[in-house]
Amino acid sequence: MSKLRKGLGDEVSATELAEMGFCEKRVQLAYIYGEQVTPEQRQAMARGQEAHQRYLEEGLAATSDRRCFVATFVFGPEAWETQVLRAYRDTVLLHRRWGRALVAAYYRVAPTGCRVMERSPATVVGVCRLLRIVVARCEKVLGNRSLP
């Protein structure tokens, strides 16, 4: 269908309906002559598309690494505590920009932390106690959400 001219009976999008309340004359002119976009608007749209692409790439990068170093080291890979922490990461942290940054920082420092814990069993006991507190809070936040 041509953007220049719409016939009777053509569907109108929700966006077009919302714009009618905003500026009837603008909608009428767009209906007759098509949508006119200024160079500034094109630049703003391009910036917005780039920002959305970066956001998508950050999210994909954060979700591509499924490891849970410290919990796996302390509790084991299939322990319920590890599963709770993974569920919290996937359902809470990875859905927020600050959470993705936190996960990325964790992946940078956690392997070194595990190497330190290998040499110090007393550290493992302390980390285990701390993680149990974190797991309890994560369970509260997750609430009735199903765990994997």
Image (spheres, rainbow, N blue to C red):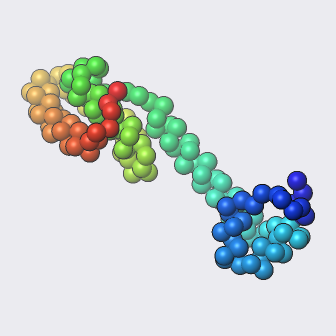
Looking at the image, can residue 109 be seen? no
Image quarter for residue 94? top left
Question: Residue drawn 29% across and 20% down?
Answer: 77
- Image spot of residue 5 (x, y percent): 90, 64
Question: Residue drawn 17% across and 22% down?
Answer: 119
**Is 141 situated above or below 126?**
below
- Image spot of residue 63 (x, y percent): 46, 35
Question: Residue drawn 46% across and 38% down?
Answer: 62
| Image quadrant in which the C terminus is located | top left
Image quarter for residue 100? top left
Q: Is residue 17 left or right of residue 26?
A: left
Q: How many marks?
A: 0
Task: Report the front residue among 89 and 128.
Answer: 89
Q: Is residue 132 left or right of residue 148?
A: left
Question: Residue drawn 69% across and 71% down?
Answer: 19
- Image spot of residue 22 (x, y percent): 66, 77
**Is 103 situated above or below 42?**
above
Looking at the image, can residue 66 be seen? yes
Task: Report the front residue among 55 and 81.
Answer: 81
Image quarter for residue 4? bottom right
Q: Is residue 31 left or right of residue 61?
A: right
